[in-house]
Image (cartoon, grey):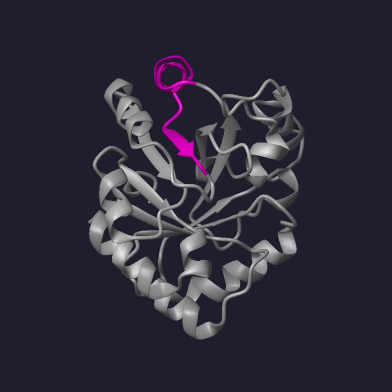
Amino acid sequence: MHTKWKTWAHVTKLDPDKHLNEEEIAEIATSGTDALILSGTLNITKENMSELRDQVKEYGLPLVVEPAGPESAIFSGIDLLYVASVMNTPDARWIVGKHRDWAMKPGIMWDKVIPEAYIVLNPDSAVGRVTGADCGISADEVAAYVTIADNYFKFPIVYIEYSGMYGDPDIVRKASEVISNATLYYGGGIDSAAKAAEMSKFADTIVVGNAVYEKGVKTLIETVQAAQ
């Protein structure tokens, strides 16, 4: 599991603050997606994170928890914990401050932790508002953040996050051209096979989230097929 994540082409992000019934979860788990990321920005607790984990774990897909903050990090019953640092925020809490607070707690299973460099580019998204990310940056500035994350900080994952909005393929393309070691993730607004295919040309891994709730599992399956 500790290296398999590098081969994932398509992952599905499920929000503990949103509800899916058993039939929907079964369809998602058998859609062909490579893994499930349990993640959200608002109203995320250890309790609802654990509840969602319990709903999906029986299907045997790799399970990743991506906590919004230390308060929603769980380790039991999951494979990996993706921990984000937002590169393009002036607020150091979201780069290293929350992480310092978390590291002071006992019981962290560091062998499950994968650091992510986040570049947040949708100012209207919850993650953009909460972290105070500077979303109005140019493609060259995004590429510079990617280069720093990859070559200086040595993050294993660089994640371009448009969170609910379909992003600029040229920005993702430019990011892919400067990255050399890290795995490039793209997430945001992928709600069709065409968008999945377009972003899959540049990103190593695409993340589909809101489409599951807004358009249903049929659309998710179409994005899986386009990404493979």
Q: In the picture provided, is 17 more to the left or to the right than 158?
A: right
Image coordinates of residue 57 in percent, x first then y, are 50, 71
Residue visible at 31% across and 20% down in the picture: 178
User: Number of labelled discs?
Assistant: 0
Does 120 lie within the magenta span?
Answer: no
Residue at the image position 43 percent from the left and 16 percent from the top? 144
Q: Which residues are magenta?
A: 138-162
**Could you tell me if residue 153 is visible in this image?**
yes
Where is residue 131 drawn, in percent x and y? Answer: 69, 34
Quadrant location of the C terminus?
bottom left
View extreme (bottom): residue: 23
Any part of residue 6 in sight: no
The image quarter containing residue 40 is bottom right
Residue at the (38%, 29%) spot, across then down: 171
Looking at the picture, tell me which residue is in the foreground, 3 or 67.
Answer: 67
Report which quarter residue 124 is drawn in: top right
- Residue 110: where, in percent of width, then height? 56, 40
The residue lying at 73 percent from left, 28 percent from top is 93
Residue 161 is inside the magenta segment: yes
The vertical placement of 212 against 131, above or below, is below
On the picture, is 206 further left or further right than 115?
A: left
Q: Nearer the viewer, residue 45 or 108?
A: 45
